[in-house]
């Protein structure tokens, strides 16, 4: 294992992971709200926010799919060293990381089952920009409405129609993240 894989994890793992976990929960509980998450220095092309999510949410029991946009030797080695998460294809993934285009078609990710909807995949979508302007969101965790820049609207509308099944999504850009659970209604 090369030294490059050893660097870039949480400096204070317990504290940094707790802060990252809180940001991840807040983002998912309040769709459209952008959180800042720091503490990592991952290999390119992974953003700080996406890497912090992976370090916080993935371990040896959570299969991870790296889309072609993020499937690099450096990132694989870094994730393996810091989490031990096994790599898998999209159909078996509990988490998936990549750009929206590279993750297509999103229908191949596990939506859960009627008995176990919690066994759905969570997508970590790397965005070029992430702002609180764009599609209109409403539903659980949103007082009236919220807005968020999304890579597309139709896929999230189709995902909502499958509720309680469907995938959950984190959108990341640099050190910023936003959550979009499958229970959120999206309008253009």
Image: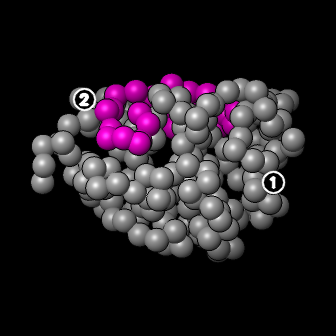
Q: Is residue 52 visible?
A: yes
Give how far across and how far down residue 176 sits, in percent.
Answer: 53, 29
The quarter of the rendered structure image containing the N terminus is bottom left
Vertical comparison of 105 with 12: above or below: below
Q: Determine the residue positioned at 22% across, 52% down.
A: 81
Residue 95 position, x and y percent, is: 49, 58
In the image: residue 3, left or right of residue 178: left
- Identify the mark at residue 12; answer none if there is no mark: 2
Nearest to the observer: residue 19 or residue 148: 148
**Magenta region, residue range:** 23-48
Q: Which residue is mark 1?
A: 154
Q: Is residue 56 visible?
A: no
Q: Quadrant of the C terminus?
A: top right
Query: Helix or strand or loop: what does disc 1 sit on?
Result: helix
Residue 139 appears at what percent x and percent y? 80, 42
Q: Is residue 54 magenta?
A: no
Specify few, some or many for label 1: CA neighbours under 10 Å numbering under 14, 14-19, or 20 or more. Answer: few
Residue 77 location, quadrant: bottom left
Query: Number of numbered discs present?
Result: 2
* Real-space Cα separation, disc 1 to disc 2, in angstroms: 40 Å
Indicate whether residue 24 is drawn in magenta.
yes
- Residue at the location (41% across, 42% down)? 45
**Mark 1 vs 2, N-terminal side:** 2
Q: Position of residue 84 (x, y in %)?
A: 27, 58
Determine whether the residue tagged by mark 2 lies in a helix, strand or loop.
loop
**Which residue is at a point 48% across and 53% down the rendered structure image?**
69
Examine the residues drawn in magenta and state their main secondary structure.
loop
Which of pointers 1 and 2 indicates the residue nearer the eye?
1
Classify 87 as above or below 134.
below
């Amino acid at each position: 294992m090369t030294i490059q894989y050893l660097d870039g994890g949480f400096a204070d793992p317990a504290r940094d992971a707790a802060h990252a976990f809180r940001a991840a929960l807040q983002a998912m509980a309040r769709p459209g709200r952008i959180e800042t998450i720091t503490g990592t220095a991952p290999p390119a092309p992974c953003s700080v926010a996406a890497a912090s999510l992976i370090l916080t949410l993935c371990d040896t029991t959570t299969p991870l799919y790296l889309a072609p946009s993020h499937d690099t030797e450096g990132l694989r080695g870094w994730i393996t060293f810091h989490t031990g998460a096994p790599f898998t294809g999209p159909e078996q993934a509990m988490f998936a990381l990549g750009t929206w285009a590279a993750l297509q078609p999103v229908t191949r990710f596990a939506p859960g089952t009627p008995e176990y909807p919690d066994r759905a995949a969570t997508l970590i979508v790397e965005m070029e920009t992430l702002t609180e302007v764009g599609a209109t969101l409403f539903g659980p965790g949103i007082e009236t409405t919220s807005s968020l820049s999304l890579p597309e609207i139709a896929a999230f509308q189709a995902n909502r129609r499958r509720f309680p099944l469907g995938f959950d999504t984190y959108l990341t850009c640099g050190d910023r993240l936003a959550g979009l659970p499958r229970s959120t209604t999206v309008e253009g």
